[in-house]
Image (cartoon, rainbow, N blue to C red):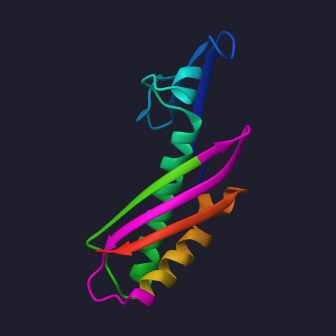
Amino acid sequence: MTRNATAVWNGTGKEGKGTLSTQSAVMNKVPYSFNTRFAEETGTNPEELLAAAHAGCFTMKLSFILNAAGFTADEIQTKCDITLTDGAISESRLTVSAKIPGISKEQFDAAVADAKTNCPVSKLYNTNITHEAVMQ
């Protein structure tokens, strides 16, 4: 399986503007710029997209791990914070909250640790990956 996205940029790094589009067209010419990345202008940025990818991948992997252990989550909610420091991604922090009937704290913590280590996006990132997990 191969998926793709396309970035188009016009102008200089600071004054220019660009768009991002995905193969599925869920994102179609979504704007990004210096100000969407480093200020508060509306649009997206690479770090936000990395956070979405990591949160989504981790959450799905956790669901598979739970199912393999005989559990089905009522809900898993994961927030991912990507930190950019001195021009490099320095951390991906996962904060997960889940409602899973019948699971113990120990089983939940083990599943979270497994998902953090083994989701494909975690394996891709060459950075410090941390997590905080709470059961509802």
Q: Is residue 94 above or below residue 18?
A: below
Give 125 or 64, whichever is nearer the viewer: 125
Number of marks in the image? 0
Q: Taking 97 as reference, is 42 above or below it?
A: above
Location of residue 92 by image quarter: bottom right
- Residue drawn at x 68%, y 56% is 125
Whether residue 33 is visible here, answered yes or no, is no
The quadrant of the picture occupied by the C terminus is bottom left
Q: Is residue 125 above or below residue 62?
A: above
One can see residue 65 in this view: yes
Q: Tell me, yes or no, whether the highlighted magenta stretch contains residue 87.
A: yes
Q: Nearer the viewer, residue 36 or 3?
A: 36
64 within the magenta span: no
Residue at x 60%, y 26% (from the top left corner): 7
- Could you say where residue 49 lies in the image, as x and y percent from the top left? 52, 41
Q: Main secondary structure of the magenta part?
A: strand
Q: Is residue 88 left or right of residue 23?
A: right
List x then y, in percent, for residue 12.
Answer: 69, 11
Q: Tell me what residue is drawn at x 30 percent, y 79 percent.
A: 100
- Start-end of magenta stretch: 83-106
Q: Which residue shows up at 51% across the image and 36% down it?
A: 23
State the image quarter where residue 119 is shown.
bottom right
To which quarter of the image does residue 73 belong? bottom left
